[in-house]
Amino acid sequence: MKHYLEQVLEILGADRRRLPWIALLVLFASLADMVGIGVVGAFVGVVLDPTLLEGNRTARLIARSLGSETHERTVLLLGLGLVALFSAKSALALGLQLTLARFARNQQVRLRRGCPVRC
């Protein structure tokens, strides 16, 4: 395994310095997915049981600061926030896919030219 990793790093040449950045982007996208799943669960809980917000002091303060006096308005605002969160998460995922595709394409071109190191 170590020998294989050394070969891959040798083939990547100078572009291996980009690997930590790409790994960080993948980690951040995974964390965003995990947060999204947790937020959906909390949102469904609030929709199904209005007393969840009433029993939580922090949730009441947030609802009041948003100008939400009714449960329906609170659910609407939370739903809009959820849409915004998933839109941002989708934009992040798209950016990550574009970054990975560009990196792979550049490696493919370099390898097809027969350049063992950056051309």
Image (spheres, helix red, strand yellow):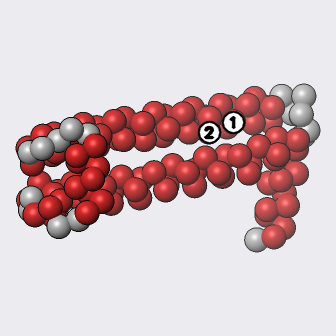
Q: From this view, report whether residue 8 is shown above or below residue 55.
A: above
Residue 32 rendering spot, x and y as whole percentages: 45, 51
The quarter of the image holding the N terminus is bottom right
Q: Is residue 79 visible?
A: no
Q: Position of residue 20 (x, y in %)?
A: 74, 51
Is residue 36 shown above or below 111? below
Q: Mark 2 falls on what kind of element? A: helix
Q: Residue at x 23, y 65 (%)?
A: 56
CB under 8 Å between callouts 1 and 2? yes
Residue to which mark 2 is pinned: 100
**What residue is drawn where x is 35% and y is 41%?**
86
The quarter in which the C terminus is drawn is: top right
Cα separation, mark 1 vs mark 2, equals: 5 Å
Q: Nearer the viewer, residue 22 or 101?
A: 22
Percent x, y of residue 34: 41, 58
Residue placed under numbered mark 1 in the picture: 103
Compare residues 105 and 76 and report the one nearer the observer. 76
In the figure, is residue 116 to the left or right of 73? right
Q: Residues within 10 Å of mark 2 (few under 14, many from 20)?
A: some
Name the residue furthest bottom: 1
